[in-house]
Image: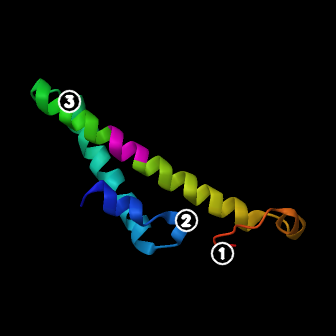
Amino acid sequence: MDSDSVQSQTIDDGAPSAIAQYEKALAELEQIVARLEQGDQSLEQSLEDYERGIRLERQCQKALDEAEQRINALNESPEEQDSAPRDTDGLF
C-alpha cells in the first residue's frame, strides 16, 4: 500500500478503511521502531526505515487530528453549532 492511497481516504470522510489503514500504519511503525532499537541493520537500511517511519508518523498524526475534529464537532452544543460557520463543501 502506498501513502497516496492512505491519504485519499481519511478519518474525516468516515471511511472505515481509513481507520483500518491507520491501524495498519501504526503496526508498521511499531515494527520499524523495534528494528531501529535492535540496531542490527546497516546504516542505509536504518535510514530507509527512519524515513518510512517519519512518513507513517505524519500519516497517523493526520488521521488522529481528523478524528479529534470529528469528535469535537459531535460534542459541540447546539448553540455552538448554530453559530459556527458552515462548510461550503456540504460536509456539515
Residue 57 in the image: state x and y as whole percent: 39, 43
CB atoms of marks 2 and 1 within 8 Å = no
Q: Is 90 or 73 nearer to us in this picture?
A: 90
Q: Earlier in the sequence, mark 2 or mark 1?
A: 2
In three-dimensional space, the C-alpha distance between marks 2 and 1, rounded to whole angstroms, equals 13 Å
Q: Which residue is mark 1?
A: 90
Magenta segment main secondary structure: helix
**Residue pushed farthest front?**
88
Type of amino acid under label 1: Gly
In three-dimensional space, the C-alpha distance between marks 1 and 3, rounded to whole angstroms, equals 42 Å
Q: Nearer the viewer, mark 1 or mark 3?
A: 1
The circle on residue 47 is 3
Q: Which residues are magenta?
A: 54-58
Q: Secondary structure at mark 1?
A: loop
Type of amino acid under label 2: Asp
The circle on residue 27 is none
Specify the color scheme.
rainbow
Residue 66 in the image: state x and y as whole percent: 56, 57
Question: Residue at (47%, 64%) from the top-left corner?
Answer: 10
In three-dimensional space, the C-alpha distance between marks 2 and 3, rounded to whole angstroms, equals 32 Å
Q: Which residue is mark 2?
A: 12
Question: Residue at (26%, 41%) from the top-left corner?
Answer: 52
CB atoms of marks 2 and 3 within 8 Å = no
Residue 16 in the image: state x and y as whole percent: 44, 74
Mark 2 is surrounded, within 10 Å at the Cα level, by few (under 14), some (14 to 19) or many (20 or more) other residues, namely some
Residue 54 in the image: state x and y as whole percent: 34, 38
Q: Secondary structure at mark 3?
A: helix
Q: Is 38 or 3 nearer to us in this picture?
A: 3
Type of amino acid under label 3: Leu
| Whether residue 40 is visible | no
